Image: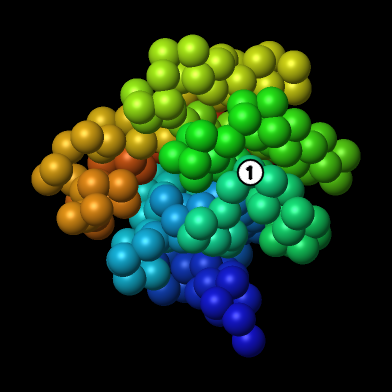
């Protein structure tokens, strides 16, 4: 059993581990996947402190029954995510958070390549009748202003094309804060992940409610 399979099992057990009431546990959970890189995988953190686990806890506290699979793979670019999306996102998934692009920007990959990969990921998921939430990323300033502008606009263009909700910056409120990042200043601490989820939870909850209303 690989790390991704183990993570899936743990995430599917979250309603029980989080102590959801018996009545709520009987409800059909909203099946979600967080498709991303090390920021999703929880690099340097225990599984319970990774973004999908913290998000599941917060959503459960708001009364939602969810099962979130952690499909984050450290080092993945958008192209790598595209190459594994068909098997990383299980059948029956209702809502996918696509949070890819950080490694593309760090490596200065041509924005057109990243754009095409994300476009294909979204298209494949929508073809499988899955709802998608798009989490954007900002490029580091050393790539130059033109690259930064085009990289940010890429997510806006994709969201408009596919009619998707867009969360503009996955690391909003965390990037650049030494207190919320590990020593590499790239990956959030457990406190940083809590801040990410705090800022993003309303956005994701809206997506969960949309899934529930469409059942």
Kindly indicate the quadrant of the structure image that contains residue 112.
Answer: top right
Q: Residues within 10 Å of mark 1 (few under 14, many from 20)?
A: many
| The one of 58 and 49 positioned closer to us in this rendering | 49
Q: For residue 92, say whether it is visible.
A: no
Q: Residue furthest right?
A: 127
Looking at the figure, which quarter contains the C terminus?
top right
| The one of 36 and 53 positioned closer to us in this rendering | 36
**154 left or right, relative to 48:** right
| The one of 158 and 96 positioned closer to us in this rendering | 158
**Image x and y of residue 131, in percent:** 71, 37
**171 left or right, relative to 80:** left
| The one of 160 and 103 positioned closer to us in this rendering | 103
Q: Residue furthest bottom?
A: 1
Judging from the image, what secondary structure is the residue with disc 1 in? helix
Return the residue at label 1: 78
Looking at the figure, which quarter contains the N terminus?
bottom right
Residue at point 62%, 76% (across, down): 5
24 to 211, vertically: above or below: below
**Image x and y of residue 150, in percent:** 55, 16
174 to 13, vertically: above or below: above
**Image x and y of residue 105, in percent:** 49, 35
Residue at point 75%, 17% (across, down): 161
Q: How is the image coloured?
A: rainbow
**Image x and y of residue 160, in percent:** 68, 14
**104 left or right, relative to 125:** left
Q: For residue 41, say whether it is visible.
A: yes
Residue at point 37%, 62% (across, down): 43
**57 left or right, relative to 105:** left
Residue at point 47%, 31% (across, down): 137
């Amino acid at each position: 059993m690989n790390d991704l399979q183990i993570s899936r099992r743990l995430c599917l057990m979250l309603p029980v581990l989080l102590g959801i009431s018996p009545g709520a546990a009987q409800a059909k959970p909203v099946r979600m996947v967080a498709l991303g890189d090390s920021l999703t995988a929880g690099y340097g953190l225990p599984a319970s402190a990774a973004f999908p686990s913290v998000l599941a806890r917060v959503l459960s506290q708001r009364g939602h029954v969810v099962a979130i699979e952690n499909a984050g793979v450290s080092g993945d670019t958008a192209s790598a995510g595209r190459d594994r999306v068909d098997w990383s996102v299980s059948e029956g998934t209702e809502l996918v958070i696509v949070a890819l692009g950080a490694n593309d920007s760090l490596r200065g990959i041509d924005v057109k390549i990243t754009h095409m990969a994300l476009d294909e990921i979204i298209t494949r998921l929508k073809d499988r009748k899955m709802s998608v939430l798009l989490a954007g990323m900002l490029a580091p300033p050393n790539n130059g202003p033109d690259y930064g502008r085009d990289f940010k606009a890429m997510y806006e263009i994709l969201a408009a094309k596919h009619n998707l909700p867009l969360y503009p910056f996955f690391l909003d409120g965390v990037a650049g804060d030494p207190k919320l990042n590990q020593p590499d200043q790239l990956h959030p601490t457990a406190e940083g992940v809590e801040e990410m989820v705090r800022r993003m939870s309303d956005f994701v909850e809206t997506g969960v409610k949309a899934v529930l209303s469409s059942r």
